[in-house]
Amino acid sequence: MRAALVQMTVSDDPAANLAAARGLIRQAAAGGAGLVLTPEMTNCLSSSRDHQRSVFRHEEADETLAALRQEAAKAGIWLLIGSLGLLTHDADGRFANRSFLIGPDGGIAARYDKIHMFDVNVSETEVYRESQGYRPGTLAVLADAGWAKIGMTVCYDVRFPQLYRRLAQAGAQVITIPAAFNHITGAAHWETLVRARAIETGCFVLAPAQTGFHPEGHGNGRRTHGHSLAVAPWGEILADAGTDPGVTFVDLDLAQVAAARGRVPALTHDREFAGP
């Protein structure tokens, strides 16, 4: 299977972001990709909760989701929409950060709501409280695409290896980590974390990312790390997209999953232990 990682620099304008995403997805499909992956928050990156509330839609009314489902059907590809910011019907008004796997018929094959919220103090000037605006998901998702079983995660999830082990032990062969990784933590941790998740699970890990400075008409903007990664089950980096927006191709041989797990069958070596 040929996969394509779409790296983007989205703004807080969903219409402009949709146009950019469609162009890159078409480029990926024209290059022979059967699986195309976009980054976290493909529809909008914004620091303003009020702006998010004004431009986000419920899933059934979201224009980005509808349009990208059409793109997948037109091209006959599997499409991982890294995530979309969506309105929910929750009483507290918080949003969902939801990843979608779209089938070649344009149907929604699987949904995953990001479980772990980015509530961190990166520096004195960069403080994030994702849980104030987004409610965390509660369900791990393993999707059967026919050609592979795909475990779905998003961004900050990458720091919680127990999720990845569960997905791998349930049968995942490919794990997706669409991200809008902070530029400071990304430079320090991104590559190491993504490679570790691949090595621990014996899975291909595909991590399409946001990159660069993201302008906002209703906020100060932010920076993301870029460097979309494709990592093999043995831990080799197969592709690194650098810091420019665009499309990066990688060919997946799923026989490498069984080969890596056969060499180090750690997924079968769990032991019960006491303490601390």
Image (cartoon, helix red, strand yellow):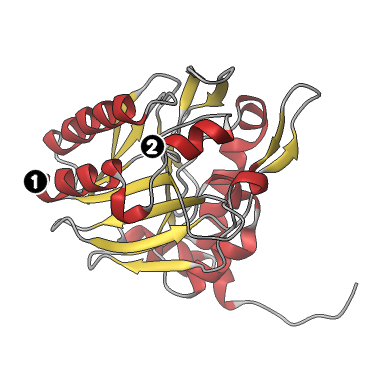
Q: Quadrant of the C terminus?
A: bottom right
Q: Is residue 131 left or right of residue 225?
A: right
Q: Of helix, strand and loop, which one carries label 1?
A: helix
Residue 192 image-quadrant placement: top right
Q: Residue 11: image x %, image y %?
A: 43, 23
In the drawing, what numbered circle is on residue 74?
Answer: 1
Q: Is residue 203 left or right of residue 271?
A: left
Q: Of helix, strand and loop, which one carries label 2?
A: loop
Q: Which residue shows up at 22% across the image and 33% down it?
A: 22
For label 1, the crowd category at 10 Å Cα-Cα, with few meaning under 14, some 14 to 19 and many 20 or more, is some
Query: How much space separates mark 2 and mark 1, taking CA atoms?
Result: 19 Å
Q: Residue 222: image x %, image y %?
A: 57, 22
Q: Is residue 238 visible?
A: no
Q: Residue 141: image x %, image y %?
A: 44, 67
Q: For this rendering, which residue is in front, 145 or 251? A: 145
Q: For this rendering, which residue is in front, 207 or 45? A: 45
Q: Residue furthest right?
A: 276
Residue 39 image-quadrant placement: top left
Q: Is residue 78 visible?
A: yes
In the drawing, what numbered circle is on residue 153?
Answer: none
Inspect the image, locate mark 2, and give the three-letter code of the amino acid beneath it: Thr
For label 2, the crowd category at 10 Å Cα-Cα, with few meaning under 14, some 14 to 19 and many 20 or more, is many
Residue 118 image-quadrant placement: top right
In the drawing, what numbered circle is on residue 42?
Answer: 2
Query: First in sequence: mark 2 or mark 1?
Result: 2
Inspect the image, locate mark 1, and give the three-letter code of the amino acid beneath it: Lys
Q: Which residue shows up at 44% across the image and 60% down it?
A: 112
